[in-house]
Amino acid sequence: MAGLHKFYLGRPAWGVAYLLLIVTPIPHIASAIEAVWYLVQDNESFNRRFNAEAVTIPSPPADDGTAERVVALATALRELDCLRQDGLLSEYEFEQKRRQLIERLG
């Protein structure tokens, strides 16, 4: 049905216009033209035009050593969890060590 794509793309006013003109060939011709137009667009320009709020630009990695600290913390926490799962640490000891790691590396 011609015009429903406008609702999906976040253009409800155009969708209503298409539905009001459904008895004429105008929405069908316009939909066919738009289908070709949508297909020839690359993903980036389509997303920029119709999904602007969904597109996120990744921030550049921090140069202050944050990434290394996060990796070190994650590795230490995994090792601690392995010790807990193996029964070498109690839940209480695990929680104490976990807090110490987070305070020291965080």
Image (tube, grey):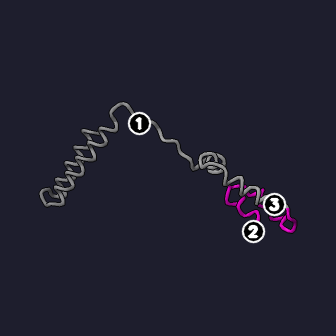
Q: Amino acid at mark 1?
A: Pro
Q: Earlier in the sequence, mark 1 or mark 3?
A: 3
Secondary structure category for the residue under label 1: loop
Does the segment drawn in magenta span residue 9? yes
Q: Label 3 neighbourhood size at 10 Å, few (<14), some (14-19), many (20+)? A: few
Q: Nearer the viewer, residue 79 or 43?
A: 43
Label whose residue precedes the other's in the sequence (2 or 3): 2
Relative to residue 62, is residue 68 drawn left or right?
Answer: left
Q: Which mark is drawn over residue 1?
A: 2
How crowded is the residue under tag 1: few (<14 C-alpha within 10 Å), some, or many (20+)? Answer: few
The amino acid type of the residue labelled 3 equals Ile
Say if 103 sits above or below 90 in the image: above
Please name the residue that numbered disc 1 is placed on.
61
SS class of the residue under badge 3? helix
Residue under the image location 74 percent in, 55 percent down: 34
In the rendered view of the protein, which quadrant contains the C terminus?
top left
Q: Which residue is mark 3?
A: 29
Q: CA distance from mark 1 to mark 3?
A: 48 Å
The magenta region covers 1-25
